Image (spheres, grey):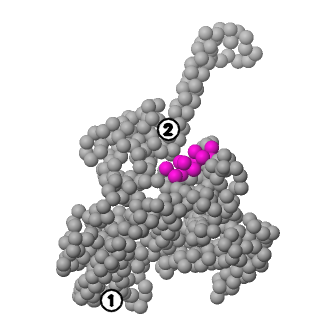
């Protein structure tokens, strides 16, 4: 195909450009861009992204120029390579200057990716392969890169929904940053490996038999895949640290089953992304009544009706089998694609009608907010801290009375919720009700709160600045106070001007050069 020919040409160019270079491991450098391109093609990314993966180091490390890349492969490939090149290498500076310099690099990366998130997907693939080969670096370099991976790139992969990248980045970084904890946890899991495997195998057998014997699923010609997994090491360690509970028996999703449903074709045609949703709820009912299993009704989570911010959708429930907690995730094949590859999955999904046709495909509201922050004059380190806290940090989800969900940074207050709904709602707010009860506007929101903003006749005070936690809310409040200050200055100027006219009207009329009579104005009109 034409795309295959273009990718092959990019491989030739990358091979020639890097032919004399070697990696720290002693391998030819070309292995790295090829591995990056394989990761991208494994995600079923478009040809432009795969070509950019092959070429991402060429301008930085060879004599190839952006102009040459554009002439050979087009503007899109050039833009991705250019965005990647800006942050592809850490500065070779003394440690004292490292933090500020690296913060500036990260700021540039965040700004670059706001127009086209394929830049960050290439960067994540680049980082993942570098993490896989980190053993060839010096120990201090291993720790620096791992810390940055855990603080920035793994949360970014999570925010974009690229689960397989996120989990591997976290586990490798965990191994280098906390080697003792990593070894100890790995040993504990290894000691119970046979128990986990028995639980998984027996659970898969029972679940497969139940689903394949169900007349509803057979009648719908549904493809059924049941797979099992144990929780990733870093995710497990982090959960135990947060809960201050080292007992593996108290982790409900340590062992998990995943049910992936592929709806049958209708009239020989593949169905759309929304097909099969009702089947997930049907399977949930079957799972809750599996023979030999004890259901845990309080553990049901519906991420289909209420998706996560990165687009993740699934039904989660938990069962007890022979004393072992087993989590079950139920999703369609399309939901699974989104769960594994996140924003990248929109390219790989077959349903062309679901794809936006414009470049808006490569942008999202949360990326756009980065552009707004960039307009505020802040130092690079503050900017990166803000992105980490408000976009890559923990989130809180609250409901409005109409059922809409607001997704805010952890620690957000009622003031932040009001301004996220709409600036005018925030500016006219005079009170807040949470779960039907009045609360102060400084109230810190909690997951699941039902928020009702009371509007009409309200007016912000400077005290609100103390309660506003998000940069966006503070920016809107500052703009309001500036406009009010300007309005106050204008009114003061008017009063002074008309007082002067009133006090000196006789002198003004007497000294006028105009040949016709006139009256001294008393109002602006």
Which corner quadrant holds the C terminus?
A: top right
Task: Report helix, strand or loop for mark 2.
Answer: helix
Magenta stretch prevailing secondary structure: helix
Report if residue 442 lies within the magenta region: no
Which residue bears the numbered disc 1?
Answer: 221
Magenta residues, as a range?
Answer: 379-389
| Lateral position of residue 57 relative to residue 404, left or right | right
Q: Can residue 369 be seen in this view?
A: yes
Q: Residue at x 55, y 57 (%)?
A: 147
Query: Is residue 277 visible to the viewer in this orientation of the structure?
Result: no
Decide whether residue 385 is among the magenta residues: yes
Q: Quadrant of residue 216?
A: bottom left
First-in-chain label (1 vs 2): 1
Quarter-of-image position of residue 415: top left
Q: Residue at 74% of width from left, 79% of height from top? A: 15
Is 525 situated above or below 253?
Answer: above
Dot 2 corresponds to which residue? 477
């Amino acid at each position: 195909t034409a795309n295959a020919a273009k990718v092959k040409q990019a491989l030739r160019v990358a091979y020639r450009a890097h032919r004399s270079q070697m990696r720290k491991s002693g391998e030819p450098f070309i292995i790295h861009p090829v591995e990056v391109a394989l990761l991208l093609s494994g995600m079923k990314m478009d040809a432009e992204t795969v070509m950019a993966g092959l070429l991402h180091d060429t301008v930085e490390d060879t004599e190839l120029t952006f102009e040459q890349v554009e002439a050979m492969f087009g503007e899109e490939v050039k833009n991705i390579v250019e965005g990647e090149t800006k942050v592809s290498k850490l500065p070779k500076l003394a440690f004292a200057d490292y933090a500020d310099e690296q913060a500036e690099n990260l700021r540039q990366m965040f700004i670059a990716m706001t127009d086209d998130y394929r830049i960050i997907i290439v960067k994540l693939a680049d980082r993942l392969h570098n993490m896989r080969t980190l053993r060839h670096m010096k120990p201090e370099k291993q720790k620096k890169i791992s810390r940055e991976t855990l603080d920035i790139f793994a949360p970014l992969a999570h925010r974009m929904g690229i689960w397989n990248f996120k989990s591997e980045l976290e586990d490798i970084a965990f191994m280098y940053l906390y080697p003792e904890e990593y070894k100890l946890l790995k040993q504990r899991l290894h000691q119970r490996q046979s128990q986990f495997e028995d639980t998984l195998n027996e659970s898969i057998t029972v679940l497969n038999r139940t689903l394949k014997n169900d007349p509803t699923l057979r009648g719908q010609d549904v493809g059924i895949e049941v797979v099992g997994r144990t929780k990733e090491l870093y995710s497990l360690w982090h959960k135990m640290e947060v809960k201050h509970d080292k007992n593996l028996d108290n982790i409900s999703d340590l062992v998990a089953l995943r049910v992936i449903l592929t709806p049958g074709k209708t009239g020989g045609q593949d169905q759309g992304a929304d097909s099969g949703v009702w089947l997930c709820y049907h399977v949930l009912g079957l799972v809750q009544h599996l023979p030999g299993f004890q259901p845990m009704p309080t553990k049901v989570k519906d991420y289909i009706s209420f998706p996560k911010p990165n687009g993740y959708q699934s039904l989660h429930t938990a069962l007890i089998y022979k004393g072992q907690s087993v989590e079950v995730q139920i999703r369609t094949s399309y939901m699974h694609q989104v769960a594994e590859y996140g924003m990248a999955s929109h390219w790989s999904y077959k349903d062309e009608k679901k794809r936006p046709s414009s470049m808006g495909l490569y942008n999202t509201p949360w990326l756009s907010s980065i552009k707004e922050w960039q307009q505020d004059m802040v130092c690079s380190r503050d900017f990166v801290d803000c992105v980490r806290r408000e976009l890559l940090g923990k989130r809180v989800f609250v409901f409005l009375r109409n059922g809409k969900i607001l997704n805010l940074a952890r620690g957000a207050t009622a003031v932040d919720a009001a301004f996220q709904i709409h600036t005018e709602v925030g500016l006219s707010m005079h009170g807040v009700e949470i779960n039907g009860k009045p609360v102060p506007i400084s109230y810190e929101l909690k997951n699941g709160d039902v928020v009702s903003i009371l509007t009409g006749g309200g007016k912000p005070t400077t005290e609100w600045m103390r309660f506003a936690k998000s940069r966006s809310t503070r920016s809107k409040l500052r703009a309001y106070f500036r406009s009010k200050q300007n309005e106050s200055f204008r009114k003061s100027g008017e009063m002074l001007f008309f007082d002067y006219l009133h006090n000196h009207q006789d002198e003004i009329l007497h000294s006028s050069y105009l040949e016709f009579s006139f009256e001294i104005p008393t109002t602006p009109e």
